[in-house]
Image (spheres, grey):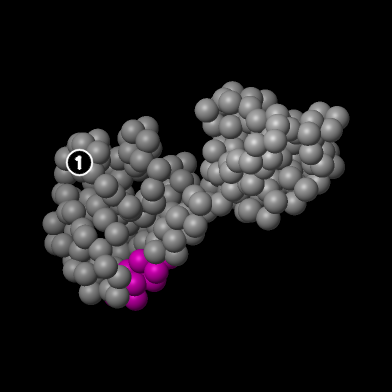
Amino acid sequence: MNILICDDIKEDADRLATLIAQSSFEAQTMVFTCPSQALDYCRSGADIDACFLDIIMPKMNGIKLAEKLRENNFANDIVFISNSNDFASQSYQVLAFDYLLKPLTCEKVSNIMCKLKKSQENTENADKAGLSLVTQGTARFVLFRDISHVEVISHTVYIKQLDKSIIKMYAVFSKIEEKLLADSRFVKCHRSYIVNLSEIKTMANNELTMKNGSKIPISRKYSQVKDKIIEWMFK
């Protein structure tokens, strides 16, 4: 696991690197005391599995650094470090993985490393999951991660993919539904729609806007999924 550490107090940054090295997990750490240098390193295309960011830093605090990382398409885990809980709510805005309070201890760091490892393993397994389909006599496999949402009109199922291509097939929707909903990334928000939670951009009133621009209704019957959507968006 490749881990970036950014803390303007070098002693704290080095201590975290030492605690990670002393944990039972194999990890390579890159330590920075300057947020702009850490950002440049990420922009260079370096392979980073997780970032540990101190929140209170001069010129660019950890929240702002995380925002810039997300703007540059860093999709992996971000863990914040702070002396105070005051910034915990802001951490949700950048989809933080966790929030650690100083002083850091062996136990705290080992626990978070365990959670990061499990998250990474779950992601790797999830990346291989998908649907086996037969369309127009041709068998194909569609990865769940490539599906934005699925819509049914009459007996025709439309699988809308991230690249905006559409797979059209005649099938029993309940069978497709069963396979999709067995994966935690998908929810049914309307009798005719199943959406990939990872591809939701915004939720307002009774409508979802997907990252590809599609508008998906949330019917009253499935209004309880709003809680799951909010939990996913801010997990």
- Total numbered circles: 1
Residue 139 percent location from the top left of the image: 63, 41
- Tell me the element at label 1: helix
- Where residue 145 sits, quadrant-wise, is top right
- Name the spot of residue 95 as percent of width and height, x first: 46, 46
Of the pair 143 and 181, the residue shown nearer to us: 143
Residue drawn at the location 58% of the way across and 32% of the way down: 161
**Residue 184 in view, yes or no:** yes
How packed mark 1 is, by other alpha carbons closer than 10 Å (few <14, some 14-19, many 20 or more), is some
Inspect the magenta stretch and tell me whether residue 22 lies in it.
no
- Residue 96's place in the image compared with 214, above or below, is below
Residue 110 versus residue 95 in the image, above or below: below
- Answer above or below: position of 56 versus 12: above
- The x and y percentages for residue 194 are 71, 40
User: Image quadrant for the N terminus?
Assistant: bottom left
Which is more toward the observer, 96 or 178?
178
- Amino acid type, callout 1: Tyr
Tell me: 2 left or right of 176: left
Q: From the viewer's perspective, is 228 left or right of 116? A: right
Residue at the farthest front position: 137
Look at mark 1 in the image and give the residue it sits on: 41
Whether residue 53 can be seen here? no
Q: Nearer the viewer, residue 135 or 83?
A: 135
Q: Which residues are magenta?
A: 105-115
In the image shown, does 49 or 130 lie closer to the viewer? Answer: 130
As drawn, the residue found furthest toward the left would be 10
Main secondary structure of the magenta stretch: helix
**Which residue sits at x=75%, y=46%?**
177
Look at the image and say whether residue 110 sits in the magenta stretch. yes
Where residue 120 sits: x, y (%)?
Answer: 42, 58
Residue at x 65% of width, y 36% of height: 138
